[in-house]
Image (tube, helix red, strand yellow):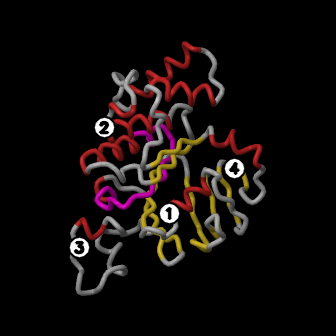
């Protein structure tokens, strides 16, 4: 089990409780969506997974076999090297080429041999269909291309889990579907993917395990869910039919 939360309380940095009694589990090769309204706790939950926020109140709270209730700061860098983290705004280094962005990560995580570094860079760029972009700068790439590079960066060290916070939020619909398809392919190697999204159409095209943050709770709604049932509680009964623009903020 890569992540195992039982009855965990999740707080923001300011001490506000956002989710209580959380049961959340991630195993190898799983593809997991977390949905919910803005401010419902999705990103806060993810921050606990990559140790940006602490978890002290829980019956169990383990990530990569480490108990978050007792985790010492000195172990966090090594644990983060077993993860890939993807953000909505890409967070590439704008003054460096794609190759230099990836070299920076590899060197920072202990890679030293120049030949092995270059081979790994070519491998991950090929994996994301960007093998011809190594010498481009981020500003020379489209949003979808930048996100592909962000994914390449995330898989450099063959992580056990990828944590993706709204990875399609700044992308058009077609590109968003391409990015999610790419993330789904990554799970075939055994890497788990946990992603937050407002793009509910993705859940129908690329099924996975679905959790919803609502009313300070995290609900597993995978079994029997459908797009409309996710929202019937959240909209007036007179408005049962929602177009996509109504759904994206949920």
Cβ–Cβ under 8 Å for marks 1 and 4: no
Decide if residue 31 is on the left or right side of residue 229. Answer: right
Question: Within the image, what quadrant is residue 69 found in?
Answer: bottom right
Q: Which contiguous range is marked in magenta?
A: 185-203
Q: Nearer the viewer, mark 4 or mark 2?
A: 2
Decide if residue 31 is on the left or right side of residue 216. Answer: left
Q: Sequence-wise, which precedes: disc 1 or disc 4?
A: 1
Q: Nearer the viewer, mark 3 or mark 4?
A: 3
Residue on which disc 1 sits: 42
Q: CA distance from mark 3 to mark 2?
A: 30 Å
Q: Sequence-wise, which precedes: disc 3 or disc 2?
A: 2
Q: Sequence-wise, which precedes: disc 3 or disc 4?
A: 4
Q: Secondary structure at mark 4?
A: loop
What residue is rendered at 62% in x and 73% in y?
16
205 or 174, which is in the foreground? 174
Q: CA distance from mark 1 to mark 4?
A: 22 Å
Residue 9, percent across and down? 64, 70
């Amino acid at each position: 089990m890569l992540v195992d939360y039982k009855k965990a309380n999740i707080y923001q940095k300011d001490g506000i409780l956002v989710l209580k009694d959380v049961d959340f589990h991630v195993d190898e090769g799983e593809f997991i969506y977390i949905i919910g309204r803005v401010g419902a706790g999705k990103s806060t939950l993810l921050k606990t997974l990559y140790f940006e926020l602490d978890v002290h109140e829980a019956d169990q709270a383990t990530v990569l076999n480490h108990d978050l209730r007792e985790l010492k700061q000195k172990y966090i860098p090594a644990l983060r090297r077993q993860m890939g983290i993807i953000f909505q705004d890409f967070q590439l280094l704008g003054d460096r080429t794609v190759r230099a962005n990836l070299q920076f990560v590899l060197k920072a995580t202990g890679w030293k041999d120049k030949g092995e570094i270059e081979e790994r860079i070519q491998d991950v760029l090929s994996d994301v269909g960007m093998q011809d972009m190594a010498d481009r700068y981020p500003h020379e790439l489209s949003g979808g291309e930048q996100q592909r590079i962000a994914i390449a960066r995330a898989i450099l060290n063959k992580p056990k889990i990828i944590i993706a916070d709204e990875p399609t939020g700044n992308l058009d619909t077609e590109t968003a579907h391409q990015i999610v398809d790419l993330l789904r392919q990554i799970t075939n190697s055994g890497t788990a993917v946990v992603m937050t999204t407002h793009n509910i159409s993705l859940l129908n095209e690329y099924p996975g395990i679905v959790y919803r943050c609502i009313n300070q709770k995290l609900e597993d709604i995978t079994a029997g869910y459908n797009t409309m049932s996710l929202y019937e509680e959240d909209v007036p009964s007179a408005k049962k039919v929602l177009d996509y623009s109504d759904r994206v903020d949920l």
